[in-house]
Image (tube, helix red, strand yellow):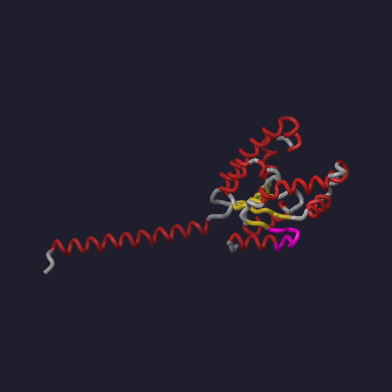
Amino acid sequence: MPTGCDVFTARSHEIRALCAFVSREVRRFLEARFAARTAPIVALHSLRGAGKSTIGRRLAERLRLRFVALDAAIEDAAGLSLAEIFELHGEAYYRRLERETLMSLLADAHGHGMVMATGGSLVNDRETYRLLRRRAVTVWLKARPEDHWNRVIQQGDQRPMAEHPHAMAELRALLAARERLYAEAEHVVDTSRTTVDGAVERLARELGVAR
């Protein structure tokens, strides 16, 4: 026949088991609840003319997030245009400012999310690119060289054609040199093979965000 101590011990085990079960269930509930509320940080990268700004703004609207152009944020931080930054301070200064600005934007976006268009050459700075890949969902907006070229011209920028007679060859070489780095992104969308709406919907679907 069980004694009072035996009953007490059994009840203690039951209570501890019940507390552990409730604790696990509460933790799972909270994790699921807050995970659902955590908005993604999405970083788009590519050469000019792939659609970073257009697709980025549309994706941000689709996900109800803020859109940020990293180059514009760098210019705001420096109080200078990108051309002036390079001319007055050089590439090393620009790279340092790029990393500092990126870190600030990522910190501000934590828990709130954002869609960011990054500069095409960011991938050349391995430390900054590693930071971006750790803290954001990276997307390569891929396009054919001809589409990069034509879209820049359509935006009203005639400089590639007017000032650089070998610009197309240089563009092909630049894209070939960076292709391996761009391809390290988590997602790749070929904008030469889809519309803006198609790219936005595909990314929203791959991000698993239903908004």
Give the camera-side residue of 167 and 135: 167
Residue 137 sits above or below residue 72 on the image? below
**Residue at x-position 68% and y-position 35%:** 94
Which region of the structure is painted magenta? 189-198
Percent coordinates x, y for residue 77 in the rendering: 66, 37
With 39 as the anchor, is 20 left or right in this view? left
Percent coordinates x, y for residue 203 in the rendering: 64, 60
Is residue 139 in the magenta section?
Answer: no
**Residue at x-position 66% and y-position 37%:** 95
With 92 as the anchor, is 155 left or right in this view? right
Image quarter of residue 81:
top right
Position of the C terminus, as image quadrant, is bottom right
Percent coordinates x, y for residue 109 in the rendering: 58, 48
**Residue at x-position 67% and y-position 42%:** 124
Tag count: 0
Give the camera-side residue of 134 and 179: 179
